[in-house]
Amino acid sequence: MPTSAELRATARTSLSGNWLPAIGITLLFAVILGVVSYIPYIGEIGVLLLGGPLTLGLITYFVMLVRNEKPLVGLLFGSFDRFPVSFLVYLLVQIFVFLWTLLLIVPGIIAALRYSQAFFILRENPNIEAMDAIRQSKEMMVGHKGRLFVLYLSFIGWAILAAIPFGLGFIWLYPYMLAAQAAFYEDLKGRANVGSI
């Protein structure tokens, strides 16, 4: 089972020669949702509506990057044809994590880890329903939530360094983390023997 260091190494290898477009798509994602969130009265609704397809597009980019498939930044907008299911996954995951967080912070973190693979699964199967993607994520993460949590924790030092120059380092850190998450999914998918989920 690959360690967090090995998953980060896989991410760096995938990003080698691809840093600029990876940073570009991550920045574009953040700027779009950030600008929309500041629109008076409808900002939160706008983020809710756009969050699903944009997240699916972002995940698609980094999965393809880790698979050495040379993705294009335009993939960020390539999932709007799957708006209903991507919107539902985004909405339901937000709701489930929020409800678990009402109990305590720790159950909320566990829920976020449990449903963390839903968009990856959605990306792999064009015909899957929203609740099936969430359910399969839950099943895949049995026994692996701790691994993903440790992977996230392994970025804390980088996050501290990224925050020092006015947070500019996060422009580099977020693509790194997304690539590592895609590498985690690739490993998890193989171990779960889910094939063409």
Image (cartoon, helix red, strand yellow):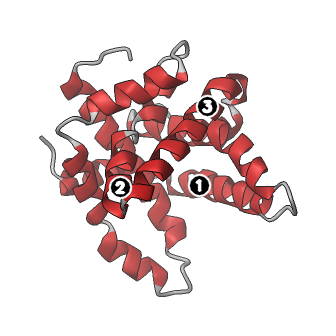
Sooner in the amino-acid sequence: mark 3 or mark 1: 1
Left or right of 131 on screen, residue 90: right
Between the residue at mark 3 and the residue at mark 1, the CA separation in whole angstroms equals 22 Å
- Distance Cα–Cα, label 1 vs label 2: 23 Å
Is disc 1 placed on a helix, strand or loop? helix
Identify which residue is drawn at 49% across, 24% down. 131
Q: Are marks 1 and 2 in contact (CB under 8 Å)?
A: no
**Residue matched to label 3:** 88
Residue tagged by mark 2? 109
For this orientation, the residue located farthest to the right is 40
Could you say where residue 22 lies in the image, as x and y percent from the top left? 54, 52
| Earlier-in-chain disc, 3 versus 2 | 3
Could you say which is closer to the camera, residue 41 or residue 77? 41
30 displayed left or right of 197: right
Q: Residues within 10 Å of mark 3 (few under 14, many from 20)?
A: some
Residue type, mark 3 in image: Leu
Disc number placed over residue 26 in the picture, else none: 1
User: Which residue shows up at 49% across the image and 34% down it?
Assistant: 119
Q: Position of residue 133 (x, y in %)?
A: 45, 25
Query: How many marks overall?
Result: 3
Q: Mark 3: which secondary structure? A: helix
Is 125 displayed left or right of 184 in the figure? Answer: right
What is the number of the mark on residue 8? none
Residue 124 shows in this picture: no
Query: Which amino acid type is shown beneath numbered disc 2?
Result: Ile
Q: Earlier in the sequence, mark 1 or mark 2?
A: 1
Is residue 112 visible in the rendered image? The answer is yes
